Amino acid sequence: MAEAREKLEDEMASREEEDLDETERYFRDAGLQHVGVEKARKLTNFDCISIVRGYESYDPREAETNRAFEIITDWREKNGYDKFLKERLPQDDVFHGCWEETAYGADKYGHMIVGMQVGNIDADGLSEIAEDHVAVLQGQKMTALTQYKYLRCQGEGKPRRYKHILICNLKGVGLSIVSGKKRAIMQRLMKEVADVFPESVHKIFMVNAPMIFRAGWAIVKPWVHPITQAKINICGSESQALKMFAELGITKEQLPAWIGGTNPGKTCLDIIKDFTSGELQVLVDPIPEPPAFLSDAVDVPAKAATAGEGEGEGEGEAAAEGQDEAVEAKEQEAQEEATATGGELGRKPSLAPNGQQFSPKHITSL
């Protein structure tokens, strides 16, 4: 049993080190075409990996993957994602004071450990922040954690890890975890994270879980996707959790003090401050072997820079229109190419390039 689990862990870790294979690049390129050149060029290699692999068990796979590309790029555009690691957001100190998460050590593969004490979440304080803005602040937190994982792996000379381990301390939570305002807020934000930051969690440990939580999990577990089941671990006590961590090669030096560890950790707010102050630099992660329609795309300056300013306004507008036509021509060319090889953009061919067929999944995974 232990050997089989370790083998599976090794395989999962090994896959994180690999870029997308031919079949996965097919779904990546379809998703990039679906959202168009402007949005596609803002995505990184990690973005594409997390979306393609995060939705590989969904059916129909291409349609669901395209939808994910669209949801994520639209969400980023709407909420100012490009500025998340450049500047502090309003009320971020209030948000992190009400919902503090901290980065600690790592497992033997290099998966960063993130911990939070659910009992300390201040639901009333969070309710003072606009609901949509809370989701944006959570998005900034996840963006910072994603980049921080990369920087730590690079600094420690370890392979790339885009997933992290989440440890939730449920001590003193009681009925608030299954009902009330705290549950509603957590449910909303967790769904937001799952939709916009797929394939980001390696494992989840629920520590000091009360009996009511364990009983509820036993009821719903049979309906949960096996992949998700494998990620969630319920521990009734700290001693049980420490034993499980030891079996996974996670030492006390990697764990927070509230679970018997010695790692001081670094809060997510402090990580964000380091990025926005310039102390930490965002790693550039370009898409390898980008599709032709993307690598050949025409760079188009903003219209405000070419039109509508004083003398020569008509000439500027004409130039902008010409640039728009060039982009439309490129997109039309990509559309025709896609039609020749598999139908309209966004329409699912019956087979991927290697002839593989994808089985439907009745329940999706985290």
Image (spheres, rainbow, N blue to C red):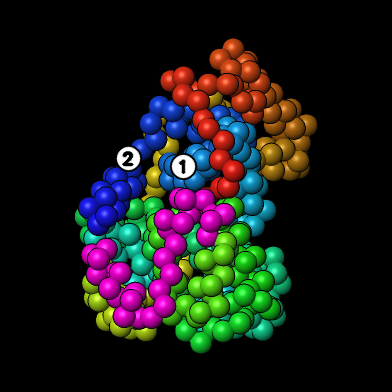
In the foreground, 123 or 340? 123
- N-term mark: 2 or 1: 2
Secondary-structure class at tag 2: loop
Q: Assign the N terminus to one quadrant of the image.
A: bottom left
Q: Which residue is mark 2?
A: 18
Residue 111 versus residue 327: which sits nearer the camera? 111
Q: Is residue 126 visible?
A: no
Q: Residues within 10 Å of mark 1 (few under 14, many from 20)?
A: some
Residue at horizontal 33 percent and vertical 43 percent from the top: 15
Mark 2 to mark 1 CA distance (whole Å):
12 Å
- Callout 1: helix, strand or loop? helix
Residue 182 in which image quadrant? bottom right
- Please say if 233 is above or below 119: above
Which residue is most to the top?
Answer: 340
Q: In percent of the image, x 33 and y 59: which residue is there?
A: 111
Q: Which residues are magenta?
A: 221-249
- Labelled disc at residue 53: 1
**What type is the residue that disc 1 sits on?**
Arg
As displayed, is residue 224 above or below residue 260? Answer: above
Determine whether, in the image, residue 196 is placed left or right of residue 269: right
The spot of residue 93 in percent (x, y) is: 55, 79
- Horizontal and vertical percent position of residue 280: 37, 63
Residue type pointed to by label 2: Glu
